[in-house]
Amino acid sequence: MPPHPMEVEDMPRSAPKSRFRPKQRISHTKSRNGCYTCKQRRVKCDEERPTCGACFVRGEDCVFPNPGGTRDLRRRQPPLPRERPSSENVHVQTRENIREIPFHPLSFNVAPSEEPQYVGDQPRSSLNMSDLNLLQHYILHTSKKMTLHKIKSVVWERVIPEMASVNEFLMHLVLALAGLDILTSGDARTANVQGSPSSSMFASVPHLRSIMEHHQQGLAGLQEALCATSDPDAETLLAGSMLVVGFAFASFGIKDLDPSTPTLQDNLNLGHASPPPLPDASTLHIQWLHLVRGVTSILRQFWPTLRKCRLRALLTHNQANDDWKLCEEQVRSTICPSSNIRSKRLRKFANGANRAVSDLRGLHTTLRQSSNSEEVADGSPFATPQSDQVGNSGQPLLDAYEQAIGVVDDIYMRILYVMQMKPLDSQSSSDLELQTDLEDAAVSSWPHLLPEEFISSLDWQGNIDMLHGLSLLILAHLYLTIAILDELWYCGKRCDVEIYKINTLIVALGDEKLVSLMDWPIDVIR
């Protein structure tokens, strides 16, 4: 129904206007004369000439349209290519900015110390670049290859350097071991022989004299700590002893670094027209046996304390037991399959260990029977002036030899037992797992098992007779337990030199039985 005319007149005049008022557009300041670059980027241009603010920040060329042109003309013109400032300009600006930055040392409100600064027990002035290079080499290289066990490696990589940082004689022993590692490595030998240390790596090769000075100072400090009247630090004594033993193992064959010395393999060539002079028993490296026995005495004395110290991981050997006796018949009769062993040394050892022990026992039985005979016939092994010095037809030595052969038998069977275990990682391309288990069996800890009479027979200074030849033969068989550890730099082929020396001495003795029994150790390491 349409409204009444009077009602229409009474309506406010503003009502139609408010109902049909058009929406107001928001005012803007759109740039219609901006540069081409801002238009292409669809950003607002401040139209600041000759270079707008956006192009100035981006370092781009700023080109404005011609004021007299039309919109169509500008649309038909292609945009100019964007160019970035050249690298030379950027570098020049950067160098100029760097020159403006002053470099000042940090300022701390700390008064300088009036006391001399020390590193451990040594004054700072005693440190030199050679020692720092040795310490760096130990941390980066030597410590990482002292063991095949990940848990034990932590001791060599972290604990021992930490202890050496506050102990003078431990630091000397660490530096000596690192220097011997550098000196006996293949690269260092090549550089020394050729006399052309062209690289910086060879330029820091230490001299043997400086290495031995560190070792002697370390030994002196260790001996002083052992003789201290106060309660000794068992952990420090064990760390020093382990470093000394590692140095002793690594020092095998150190004389072979001299290129002017004939190689020991040449001594084996008896058909040579003028063979090199043969070594005597005094050239054998026997001192390390006493060092290992000394470490054992420290372990026995402080065992309750050492079992809880930071070095306790080095004292754990899960394979060092007599489990092989539970299946002794199988261990003695079974030959390890070659497919599970890739190392030539390990294969040869596995194939001849049982027979080698049997031959040693047979020779010992023959000598004991000859010693027990009522009359010693001429030409008998005991009809020598040297055997008279042994006493009572060599019975004390024969008893010691029987015990030493028992040690050889026990260690050999322990090795064969480990080698017969199936590898946990059948896809492994190396014998690393087997070598780790052999290290865990403590196959190189046999010196403390040997009787004192046997150790004394190795220090014989006179001419070697049949009895002392047997002691050297037993020692050569024991050296094989270290020679098969190829993955440890301070073991493995380090013992080869000593085995060749023993072979030279036995060949010079001229006894066919001893010479034949030395064929197997030589064949394993050859």
Image: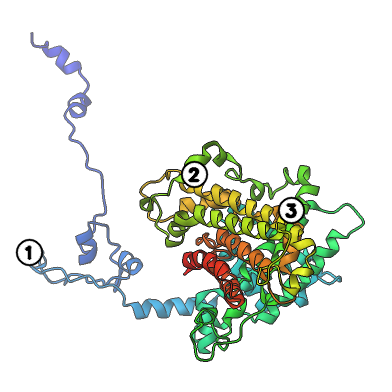
- The residue beneath circle 2 is 331
Q: Is residue 96 left or right of residue 204?
A: left
User: Which comes sooner in the sequence, label 1 or label 2?
Assistant: 1
Farthest residue in the top direction? 1
Measured along the vertical axis of the image, is residue 39 above or below residue 87?
above
- The residue beneath circle 3 is 296
Q: CA distance from mark 1 to mark 2?
A: 100 Å
Farthest residue in the bottom direction? 274
Q: Is residue 146 left or right of residue 280?
A: left
- Amino acid type, residue under disc 2 in the picture: Val
> Looking at the figure, which quarter contains the N terminus?
top left
Query: Which mark's residue is nearer the viewer, 1 or 3?
Result: 3
Disc sitting over residue 72 in the figure: 1
Percent position of residue 253, x then y:
60, 74
User: Which comes sooner in the sequence, label 2 or label 3?
Assistant: 3
Q: Nearer the viewer, residue 176 or 366?
A: 366
Q: CA distance from mark 2 to mark 3?
A: 29 Å
User: Which comes sooner in the sequence, label 1 or label 3?
Assistant: 1
